[in-house]
Image: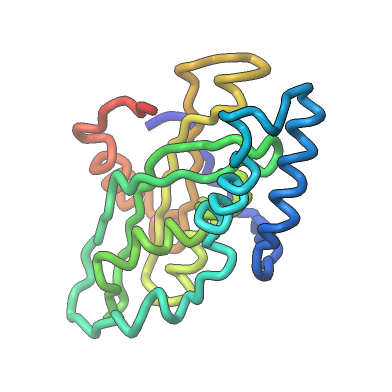
Amino acid sequence: MEDLDFNDEQVEPGPVRGDIDTSAIESAVLSMLHAFGEDPDREGLKNTPKRVARMFPELLSGYNADPMKLVNGALFNVDYDDMVIVRDIEFYSLCEHHLLPFIGRAHVAYIPRGQVIGLSKIPRVVDMYSRRLQVQERMTRQIADFIHDLLNPQGVAVVVEALHLCSMMRGVRKHDARMTTSTMLGSFRTKIATRQEFLDNISRGAGPLKI
């Protein structure tokens, strides 16, 4: 792994949104089409404002996700204190700076302190934070903090790798540049051997990110 940032500073969470106003989105997209110099009444664009308005509640569904419903009681008392890793969790998100996607995978690990979470819940946690207007650094910290607060484990580690379309399609236009962020809490931060075991595990057999 490269470009790992073991920064322990708190990253402020994004604001919680209410229900998405699809009528306002539809109106805004129509205005944008006019601003682009397009004809919103032509066949290919006639229903585009409605389609975009229907799309955003799905892309931004993480704002209204209920964390407790997401976990749904899937916490189990288990006499196990070795590392638990869920790697290569695919996700998509929207960069809050340009509203363009960033797409990648998250690797999540924790060392239990008498309690574990159901396997399917960790990808759901990733989805909850990725389906918002985001920056990758904040999302990485939010995933780690949620698992830390929920389980009170000995440690939590999260590494996120992503390709950002805002740098691929515009600006520097670097198609193969990927961003890697990390948050290490507890024993993953204080014990070099624990951190290295995690990094070795997620590096093993990892292929290139693709869109």
Of the pair 13 and 18, the residue shown nearer to us? 18
Q: Quadrant of residue 200?
A: top left
From the viewer's perspective, is 39 left or right of 64? right
Q: Quadrant of residue 114?
A: bottom left
Residue 131 position within the rendered picture, expressed as x and y whole percent measured from the top left = 52, 54
From the viewer's perspective, is 209 left or right of 15? left
Residue 21 position within the rendered picture, expressed as x and y whole percent measured from the top left = 70, 62
From the viewer's perspective, is 178 left or right of 203? right
Of the pair 198 and 23, the residue shown nearer to us? 23
Residue 140 position within the rendered picture, expressed as x and y whole percent measured from the top left = 51, 51
The N terminus lies in quadrant: top left
Give the mark count.
0
Say if 133 sits above or below 82 in the image: above
Residue 125 position within the rendered picture, expressed as x and y whole percent measured from the top left = 42, 63
Say if 185 sits above or below 208 in the image: below
Residue visible at 25% across and 61% down in the picture? 84
Say if 162 sits above or below 87 in the image: above
Residue visible at 25% across and 32% down in the picture? 206
Residue visible at 59% across and 45% down in the picture? 52
Q: Quadrant of residue 189?
A: bottom left
From the viewer's perspective, is 122 left or right of 50? left
Say if 82 sits above or below 180 in the image: below
Residue visible at 41% across and 46% down in the picture? 91
The C terminus lies in quadrant: top left
